[in-house]
Image (cartoon, grey):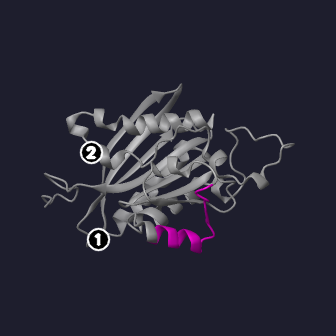
Amino acid sequence: MAGIGQAAVLALWMSWPALSAAQSVPPSVIEPAVTFPVTSAAELITPLAAQNADAEPAPETAPLRSLWADPRAVARLFREACIQTEGQPAAAVDWALAQGFSPVDPMRGSTDELLAGEPGTVLAAPGSDSRVLLVAAEGSRCTVWAERVSGPALRLALVEVTGELTGKGARVQLQVERSIERAGAWRTQMQWRYRRVGGSQDFGIGAVTTLSATPGTQALNFAPMPAATGIAPDGVRAP
């Protein structure tokens, strides 16, 4: 199920360029730096010593039994590791290590798939059984993958994060919101254009989440965007 979920997420992300001109978002922004022809992120990086052959695997729809079961924790991770660092990989990794994240051994499993062959680091969140991953790649591309999390709850938590950013003076504009069916599941795509207070670079804050509240695979993405043309969210003509 996790493989289907991740494949569906990636299919949706790759379909963004087909949006209408009024909803146009550059494909370089909303495509995460990852191709994912694997069954599960957890299977890629869980050390062999930690696997118990006699234990029955938990259903992929079962919620995480840790602090990461709270979608607000996943949204806060994304805010601190990706948004606050503006996707800078060194800063994102430093923050994650200080929080107890574990770097994924590049020799154990196909971490290259998570980074799409680009330089970067994959880290597993503490207490998540490797089902919450931070992918910090070159080019200020930062992605959080979370399995067994409620899509609607994570969407709400991310909307709250963008509201906090706006309240602190950042420029945040929701550009795209749509629902689409893939692999038998409905998912919601959302895309914001973001610029921090005093900043000159625009970034995309993207989310692909399940429409159903049933726990599933969710993805949050942060990447640079080209400068906006026309009128900015605050009513000022963008540079």
Q: Is residue 26 left or right of residue 83?
A: left
The image quarter containing residue 163 is: bottom left
Q: Closer to the camera, 187 or 25?
A: 25
Segment tinted magenta in the rendering: 91-107
* Left/right of residue 95 with respect to residue 15 in the rendered view: right
Foreground: disc 1 or disc 2: 2
In the figure, is residue 198 to the left or right of 186?
left
Rendered image: mark on residue 101:
none
In the rendered view, would you say 133 is above or below 57?
Answer: below
- Crowding near pointer 2: few (<14 within 10 Å), some, many (20+)? some
Q: Name the residue that disc number 2 marks.
A: 26
The residue that appears at 59% across and 36% down in the rendered structure is 3
Q: Position of residue 46 (x, y in %)?
A: 69, 52
Residue type at mark 2: give it: Pro
Residue 104 covered by magenta stretch: yes
Looking at the image, which residue sits at the far top? 184
Residue 218 x, y percent position in the rendering:
53, 45
Amino acid tagged 1: Val
Q: Give the labeled residue for mark 1.
A: 197
Q: Is residue 124 left or right of residue 221?
A: right
Question: Helix or strand or loop: what does disc 2 sit on?
Answer: loop
How dense is the environment of label 1, judged by Cα within 10 Å: few (below 14), some, or many (20 and up)?
Answer: few
- The correct choice, above or below, for 91 with respect to 189 in the image is below
Residue at 61%, 66% (x, y): give it: 101
Image quadrant holding the C terminus, namely bottom left
| Residue at x 65%, y 53% (from the top left corner) | 130
The extreme right residue here reads 54
Pointer 1 or 2: first along the chain? 2
**Helix, strand or loop at disc 1?**
loop
- What residue is drawn where x is 57% and y is 53%? 71
The image position of residue 146, as x and y in percent, is 57, 49
